């Protein structure tokens, strides 16, 4: 896919956020979404990353640091065939990373089609 400006990517991201499945963000609390050009390790295959403490592992006091979900713009753009595919992959990536927040691992995500 051709290079997109940050503004074009943000526009597609906004569309993708509107397409998230109903209820997927209902329990999200203290989770921030960030867009980075690429992962710190230079990986070209990583589309997103969840960093934090999954819900089932959180303490009772709620004193955990904020969780973060990263989307990697350049990797998503390189992976996508066109704008529609990019929007779909952003949705899949966000749902995948939110699932980690809920404690769902990669194996289970692949089983249910969100891998």
Image (tube, rainbow, N blue to C red):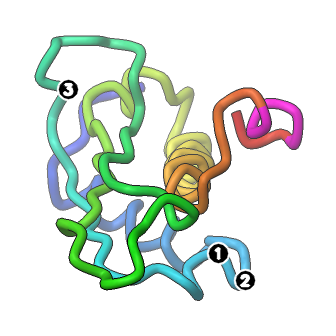
The residue that disc 3 covers is: 39
The residue that disc 2 covers is: 22
CA separation, marks 3 and 2? 29 Å
Query: Which numbered disc, 3 or 2, marks the residue that appears first in the sequence?
Result: 2
**Residue beneath the point at 65% across and 75% down:** 24
Left/right of residue 110 with respect to residue 28 in the rendered view = right
Residue 91 x/y as whole percent: 57, 56
Tell me whether circle 1 and circle 2 mark residues in contact (CB < 8 Å): yes
Instruction: Decide which of 38, 4 is in the foreground and name it.
Output: 38
Magenta stretch bounds = 108-112
CA separation, marks 1 and 2? 6 Å
**Residue beneath the point at 62% across and 48% down:** 92
> Can you say whether 55 is above or below 70 in the image?
below
CA separation, marks 3 and 1? 25 Å
| Mark 2 Cα-neighbour bin, 10 Å: few <14, some 14–19, many ≥20 | few
Instruction: Decide which of 66, 8 is in the foreground and name it.
Output: 66
> Can you say whether 113 is above or below 107 in the image?
below
Tell me whether circle 3 and circle 1 mark residues in contact (CB < 8 Å): no
The image quadrant that residue 43 belongs to is top left
Label 3 residue SS = loop
Residue 21 x/y as whole percent: 71, 73
State the predominant SS element of the stretch in magenta. helix
Left/right of residue 2 with respect to residue 20 in the rendered view = left
The residue that disc 1 covers is: 24
């Amino acid at each position: 896919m051709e290079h997109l400006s940050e503004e074009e990517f943000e526009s597609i991201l906004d569309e993708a956020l509107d397409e998230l499945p109903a209820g997927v963000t209902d329990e999200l609390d203290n989770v921030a979404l960030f867009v980075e050009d690429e992962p710190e390790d230079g990986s070209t295959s990583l589309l997103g990353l969840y960093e934090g403490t999954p819900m089932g592992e959180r303490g009772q006091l709620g004193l955990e640091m904020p969780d973060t979900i990263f989307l990697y713009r350049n990797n998503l753009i390189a992976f996508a065939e066109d704008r529609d595919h990019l929007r779909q992959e952003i949705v899949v990536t966000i749902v995948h990373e939110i699932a980690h927040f809920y404690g769902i691992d990669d194996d289970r995500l692949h089983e249910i089609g969100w891998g």
